[in-house]
Structures are given as C-alpha cells and as structure tokens.
Image (cartoon, rainbow, N blue to C red):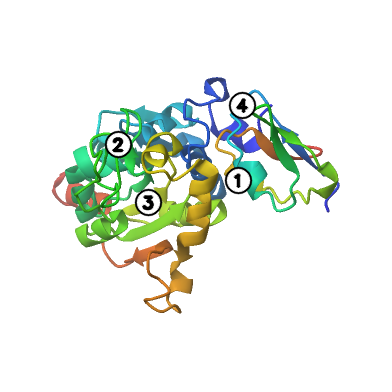
Amino acid sequence: MPSKLIEKTMRVNRLPHIWCPGCGHGILMRDVAQAIENCGLDPDKVVIVSGIGCSSRAAGYMNYNTLHTTHGRAIAFATGVKLANPELNVIVITGDGDATAIGGNHLIHACRRNIDLTVIVFNNNIYGMTGGQYSPTTPHGEKGTTAPYGNIDYNFDIPQLAQAAGATFTGRCTAYHAQQAIKLIEAGIKHHGFSLIEGLSVCPTYYGRKNKKGDSVKMLSWQKDNAVDVKAAAKMTPEQLEGKILIGELSRVDNKEEYTDMYMKIIEKVGGDK
Amino acid sequence: MENNKKLVINPKWCKGCGICAEFCPKDVLKIVHNKVQIVNDEACIKCGLCELRCPDYAIYIEKEGE
C-alpha cells in the first residue's frame, strides 16, 4: 500500500518507476504532486506536459491529464493547451537537455510571452536516458561520455536565462531540500504568468559516476552543504558565497500582463457578435 | 512523539539507495540486503523526512484512522 498522497496523485499500477536507484527525479516528482495538492487544484483542471528524457517520464506516472510529447516541444504543446483552454493549470515537467538544448527556443519565447505556465526543469546536468552525453547544464570542465576530457562549453544558469528572456517568476530548488521545493513549486503554480523553476536533481548513474561524485547520498549531501537560500545569501559576503548555489524564489514581476488574458481581450474586441 | 503515527515500508518499491537511512536524524533505518529496514523504531520521531526524500515512495508515515 502506498501513502495517501501517492495513491491520490500517481498511477500506482505504473509504479515502481523506471528511474535508477537514488535518482533525484522521484523526489522532485513527489514535490510537484504535493504542491498541486497544497494548492487545492481540481485534478481534472491540471495538465502535466512533458517532453523526452528521464525527467519527462513523470507524465506517465502522475494521475492527472497528461501529455508526453516530442523532444524539446513540451512548452509548445503546453502553450497550445493553455490557449485553447485558459482555465486549465498547465504544468510542464522537462529536463535540462529537453528545455534548454533542443527546446531552448520554445523556452525563451514562452518566457517572452509571459504565458501562464509553470515549467519545472528537472536538472540532472547530463543526458541520462541516452547514456550520459554532456548537456547545456553540465558544468564547465566536468565529464560526460561525449566529453571524456572535460566539457569545454560553459553551462547555462537556467533561472537567469528565463528571467532575462522575460519570465515573471523564477526559482531554484534541490532534491535534498524537499520542503522548500514544495513551497517554491506551490508559489510558481499560484503565480499568474510564466514561472520557471529549476529543480536540481542528482544522476548517480551517469553524471555522478563520470565525475566521481559518489552515490546519490554523497550527491545529495553536496546539495545540503552547498545550496544557500537566497534570503540567507543576502547577508553573506562574496567570499562566503564562492562555489555556492542559490535556492528559493530568485525573481518575480507582478505587473506584467499575462498572454492568454491579452489574447482573450483581442478575441473579445474583434470577434464580432456571439 | 505522536502515537497515532506509524512508519511504514513498502519493500517491493525500495531500490536500496540509502537516502532515507543516511539522512534520518535519529538513525532509525538501515539498508539490509539492498532493502530498507527499521532497526530502531523506538527512536523514530515521525518527522517524515524519509518520506519526503524517498525517490521511490517506499517509506512513509501513516496516520491511524486514515
């Protein structure tokens, strides 16, 4: 018997999931489910859209209206769903490769439009499903199967990228800090506009093994020691923040009009007699 | 400690990653033969951190009467 939350929010007959032992994605998927529950949303009005990759398997497990789409196109599909039926709560679960490599253009244009989607990027710093190729978030110098001598690319900072592109809510959470992650995702869902939340996951199978980071316990311990809440960080010196990652709500704009609202106004204005 | 709460394990879903055992504040859990076991139930404060961090939903706090 699973817990009440899992029984209510997951397709229990599909569990246990296919993710590796110690994969952070399971923790983050639970955080998303708990956040949806905490928001008190009607499950019939929740749509989970995902692309391709380890992260995107989440759409198969979550017991809502779900769409498992093509690689990188989750946000494009989600935009269509939201425009067709703006009363739906559309949540995108995507990965670092899915969202910022093949889907990079969809991401920045959805940010620019400020359409009311909540995008949660499960960032494991690598392409896990296809065998550990480096992704746009593999840190500079780290290894992947396609970067055996170290990655010479510089990595994206996903919340900064989204903020610069026009997202009106950005944040970062980790698999280790589950309670904070739930609160952040809740805030992202409640925000009326484009919300981007980077969920730092752990991939012990590829990223961890390639870079000698240890097992998932060691990788989560790293998150515990190196993630600093943005409010605490405000009181710290640049030296103290060296090598740390900021978590929490990173940016927010409340006075920018939302895309479907503006679209509905146009329909109202030029649509003629009903 | 709340007596109406119980720590429950679903061994079928446990993949033995050890996250729950490592981060349990009271050392209640141990991985034995690749599955989690409760080795010190008395010490459990039912904080639920294991449930929050289990990637496989194999451990959770059950409230009686639910």
Residue A227: assigned label: none
- Which secondary structure, mark 4? loop
- Name the residue carrying label 2: A81
Q: Residue furthest front?
A: A149
Asked if the residue at tag 4 contacts the one at tag 3, i.e. Cβ–Cβ closer than 8 Å, the answer is no
Whether A173 is drawn above or below A32: the answer is: below
Image-quadrant location for residue A102: top left
Residue A271 vs residue B12, the one in the foreground? B12
Residue A156 at x, y = what percent? 25, 53
Residue A113 shows in this picture: yes
Which amino acid, mark 1?
Answer: Leu
In this view, the mark in front (2 or 4): 4
Badge 1 crowding class, 10 Å Cα cut-off, few under 14, some 14 to 19, many 20 or more, is: many
- Give a yes or no on whether discs 3 and 4 share a subunit: no
Which amino acid, mark 2?
Answer: Val
Residue at point 43%, 34% (across, down): A205
Label 2 chain ID: A
- Which secondary structure, mark 2? helix
Position of A92 with respect to B24 (left or right) is: left
Label 3 chain ID: A
- Name the residue carrying label 4: B13
Which amino acid, mark 4?
Answer: Trp
Q: Earlier in the sequence, mark 2 or mark 3?
A: 2
- Name the residue carrying label 1: B52
Residue A22 vs residue A3, the one in the foreground? A22
Whether B14 is drawn above or below A25: the answer is: above
